[in-house]
Amino acid sequence: MYRLALLGLLLFGAWSARAVVVTPDTTLGSAIIPGNNDFFGGFSLSGVVMVTNSSVGCSGALIGDYTVLTAAHCVESAPGAGLYANPQVSFLPPANTTGNAYDGSALGVSSIAVDPSWNGSSSLGTDLAVIHLSQAAPNYATRYSLYTGMVMPATSPVILAGFGQTGTGATGATGGFGYLRAGTNEYAVTGAAFGWSSNLLIGQFYLANNTQFYDANHNLIDTNALGVADPYSSGTEVMIAHGDSGGPTFYNGQIIGVHDIGICMSTTPSSPCLVGPSISPSNNSYFGQMWGDVSVAGNAAFLDQQLAPEPASAMLVMLGLSLAAWRRWRSVA
């Protein structure tokens, strides 16, 4: 699930979807993670999870034995609307012989906390939720730490991962939710460039030498939508898609952002974002569109509160305090 914001005369719209990665070319296999093997020079994606419930399919990331980070709109449709029923978190087992589709059992959920600052608008950069599992995550799954540096890092690239749909920049997302994929991109601006919160980190889906990409009216698209001087371009470049919402973006091995929205330009409010080789489907992870992540550093207060000692850790702390008290009692007896 990810949502689309339409920009043009500052026109806003929301489009609910199910999330992850679209590649720049037709060689999709390179973006698929074989089992939970190391990816990008030994960096493990075994802690990237699929988040599902009775209404949507999303992605997330393990940040503790019992704790998963995802997007708020993956667990409820709007603030106060009530949590979606039957939430589950699924891990991709190692040495998966069926490719990269999830084939294991899902873990149940004991509770869900939504960032209290989230009001349903992605422009605030607070679209976060933390899922507390009813049992500890499997040992093979990586527990990720959260990035605490500058909200907008000075260097890139970053790694995007998720279980969302696949496709190419020319076709848009075409299907395949439930497969773990990953690739690279970079943040170019914060939401402040659009009058939004600086806690929203924004990148674009750029096509180098874009001589064959046209909009619905057969006009050549400039895929450098943000007009940056040196747009990111790579054979591993990706864009989020339906189902990637809540998935992680990694910077120097830590989670720096959580996938939130797709963004596109429009100067025609009655027909927004009609890009691609045909007018249908539109608004769907094409070249020239942008993506936005919620900054974890910018929402540290909420996340720190949710990362208080987990059940096993709390038990050890209580045991330690009990032993200390017993020893002190023995020393004065």
Image: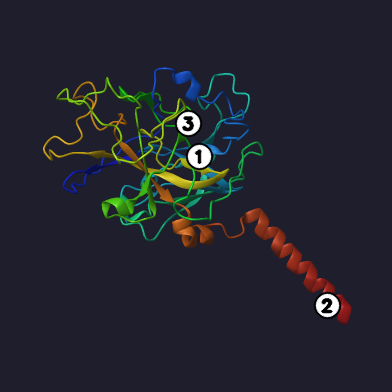
Residue hosting label 1: 89
Residue 295 lies, in percent from the top left, at 43, 51
Q: Which amino acid does label 3 sit on?
A: Gly
Name, please, the residue furthest toward the bottom: 332
Q: What residue type is labelled 2?
A: Trp
- Residues under labels 3 and 1: Cα distance? 22 Å
Q: In this view, does 180 lie to the left or right of 82?
A: right
Q: At numbered mark 2, what does the secondary structure look like: helix, strand or loop?
A: helix
Residue 96 lies, in percent from the top left, at 59, 23
Residue hosting label 2: 329
User: Circle 3: is it few (<14), some (14-19), or many (20+) Cα within 10 Å?
Assistant: many
3 or 2: tag closer to the N-terminus: 3
Residue 236 versus residue 82 in the image, above or below:
above
Instruction: Classify residue 245 by image quadrant.
Output: top left
Q: Which amino acid does label 1 sit on?
A: Val
Can you tell which of label 1 and label 2 is closer to the viewer? Answer: 1
Which residue corresponds to the image point at 39% horizontal and 17% vertical from the top-left? 26
Which of 273 and 229 lies nearest the eye of the viewer?
229
- Residues under labels 1 and 2: Cα distance? 45 Å
1 or 2: tag closer to the N-terminus: 1
Residue 249 versus residue 122 in the image, above or below:
above
Which residue corresponds to the image point at 49% horizontal and 52% vertical from the top-left? 111
Which of 228 and 80 lies nearest the eye of the viewer?
228
- Residues under labels 3 and 2: Cα distance? 57 Å
Q: Is residue 104 left or right of residue 197?
A: right
Q: Residue 183 carries which label?
A: 3
